[in-house]
Every structure is written in C-alpha cells, then in structure tokens.
Image (cartoon, rainbow, N blue to C red):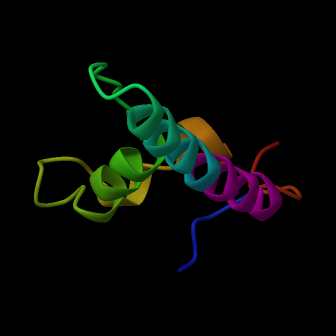
Amino acid sequence: MRRGCLQDLNHFTLKHNARLQRAVEDLQAACLGASVDFADYYNSFLALLHDAFSLGFDAASTRKACCGAGGGEYNFD
C-alpha cells in the first residue's frame, strides 16, 4: 500500500507499532489485574486518509500538511 512520502519513516512506524503492541500484550499477561491500552494513531490516520472523501474532506488536499503542496524530493518546496 502506497502511503506517500518518506517511505522509510512509514515503515519504521509500522514496525514500532507492531513491537509496541506485542509489548502491551506481554505486559497484560504479566500483570493480570492491570488494564493497558494502546492507541495506534498511525493506522487511524491512514483510515481517515483512505476515506477522506466520504468523510467530507477534499481527498486531493489531504496530504498537503504532511507532504507539502509543491514539487521537490518529498513533494515539498
């Protein structure tokens, strides 16, 4: 799945979140009475980008804030 600019950072985020989720699961198993939550902002944001039009956003402009609005190496100048 193409996620736009800075692919290395996107890949890093996916790996980080996967390891963090495993750590949360391990912590829950070790501390049976504890409640531990994990919020995955990255994938939630991707869902918003994917459904931008149906949520009332201009899908063509959803990446301007993170990727710029012009040319250049990362679509930013």
Magenta range: 6-17
Residue that sits furthest to the right in the current view? 73
- Position of residue 5 in the picture relative to residue 48 (left or right): right
| Relative image position of residue 9 (x, y in whole percent) | 77, 51
Number of numbered discs visible in the structure rendering: 0
Quadrant location, the C terminus:
top right
* Rendered residue at 55%/35% (across/down): 65
* Rendered residue at 61%/57% (across/down): 14
- Position of residue 42 in the picture relative to residue 57 (left or right): right
Residue that sits furthest to the bottom in the current view? 1
Q: Is 55 a magenta residue?
A: no
Query: What secondary structure prevails in the magenta region?
Result: helix
Q: Is 12 a magenta residue?
A: yes
Classify residue 29 by image quadrant: top left
* Rendered residue at 54%/50% (across/down): 22
| Relative image position of residue 23 (x, y in whole percent) | 57, 41
Query: In the displayed structure, would residue 39 be above or below residue 4?
Result: above
Classify residue 60 by image quadrant: bottom left
- Position of residue 54 in the picture relative to residue 12 (left or right): left
Residue that sits furthest to the top in the current view? 34
Front-lying residue, 7 or 40: 40
| Relative image position of residue 11 (x, y in whole percent) | 71, 62
* Rendered residue at 86%/55% (across/down): 72
